[in-house]
Image (cartoon, helix red, strand yellow):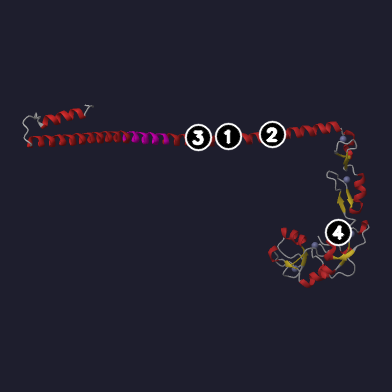
Amino acid sequence: MGYDTERFVGYVNEGLLCCICRDVLEDPLQAPCEHAFCASCIHGWLVHHNSCPEDRQPLDLPILRPLYRYMKNDLNRLQLHCKNREYGCEMVCSLESIDRHECECDYSRIPCSNSDCPVQVERRNLNSHLAVCEYRSRECAHGCGYAILNADDAQHNCVAELRTELELLRSEMIYRMEEAKHEMESRLDSQRRHMVQKESILQKEIEELKSQMSTVMSDMHTLMASERQHRQELEQAELEKQELLELVKCLQKDYRFIRDGSKKAAIIPPLTRLELKQNQGRPWL
Ligand SMILES: [Zn+2]
Ligand SMILES: [Zn+2]
Ligand SMILES: [Zn+2]
Ligand SMILES: [Zn+2]
Ligand SMILES: [Zn+2]
């Protein structure tokens, strides 16, 4: 729907009127036949028709275009009265800026800013309404700290109000504590699992080290035993060497004795001597 021609100051060119509502164009669109319409008017028309309402030429939504620029300029420059003229607003301004004015117009009716209040007032009267609005709230005079609606004044009971609040706080605190407890428990659980895992790994490592150590120990025992045997064999070889040296000395003595021709010397056969020495030198046998 367009702007009522009555609101305009001075002459309005026929071409700036909507072909459907006959008011001044609002959000204008133009057909290829150059007829112009308010957007809402032509949209409504094309629901049941497919031609221009003025000359019956074929018409469809997609072929509608914005108004020619010069016409748009003429339209924007038209001067008109505020829609709240009947309530007292004396504003006259260009069509281009009328929406901006009407959004801020003191005579526009707006809803009370208290939620739930059904009252609508002119913007200029809002403050005086708020002072008496049944839905205005103020802080309780008895000091409980509550903002109470004017309408609920008689029913307000500080103790009951505070008790309800306390219950709410208490249940919220319990809820939070439960939550914290659960989180703590789950954290502890996961740590415990982690520790158990670690412990079993360590246990395995200990077992492995133990088995390695026992292998090393048994190797060492074997080595020590063979070392002991070697030493014993060495000692025995040393003893045998000493005996053999002594034997050699005796044999040399015997030889000299025989060579000197002494017939009185008792001749002990060398083999017997050797056997005797062997038996003496091996007390462990
Ligand atoms: Zn129209
Ligand atoms: Zn037409
Ligand atoms: Zn106004
Ligand atoms: Zn109100
Ligand atoms: Zn109170």
- Ranked by sequence position, the earlier of labels 1 and 3 is 1
Instruction: Characterize the local packing of mark 4: few (<14), some (14-19) or many (20 or more) Cα atoms within 10 angstroms.
Output: some
Circle 1: residue type: Asp
- Ranked by sequence position, the earlier of labels 4 and 2 is 4
Q: Dividing the picture into quarters, in which one does residue 76 lie?
A: bottom right
Image position, residue 255 (x, y; %): 10, 36
Q: Are marks 1 and 3 in contact (CB under 8 Å)?
A: no
Circle 4: residue type: Glu
- Ranked by sequence position, the earlier of labels 3 and 4 is 4
Residue identifier under label 2: 177
Image position, residue 4 (x, y; %): 86, 62
Q: Are marks 4 and 1 in contact (CB under 8 Å)?
A: no
Query: What stretch of residues is rendered in magenta?
Result: 209-222
Label 3: element kind = helix
Q: Which mark is residue 10?
A: none
Q: Is mark 4 within 8 Å of ligand 3?
A: yes
Residue identifier under label 1: 189
Q: Are marks 3 and 2 in contact (CB under 8 Å)?
A: no
Q: Dividing the picture into quarters, in which one does residue 24 lie?
A: bottom right
Compared with 104, 264 (above or below) is: above
Instruction: Characterize the local packing of mark 1: few (<14), some (14-19) or many (20 or more) Cα atoms within 10 angstroms.
Output: few
Q: What is the spatial separation of the Cα atoms under label 4 and label 2, in whole angstroms?
A: 55 Å
Does the stretch in magenta take in 217?
yes
Q: Looking at the picture, tell me which residue is in the foreground, 211 or 165.
A: 211
Which quarter shows the C terminus?
top left
- Ranked by sequence position, the earlier of labels 4 and 1 is 4
Q: What is the spatial separation of the Cα atoms under label 4 and label 1, in whole angstroms?
A: 66 Å
Using residue 79 as the reference point, say whether residue 20 is left or right of it: left
Task: State ligand 1's quadrant.
Answer: bottom right
Residue identifier under label 4: 102
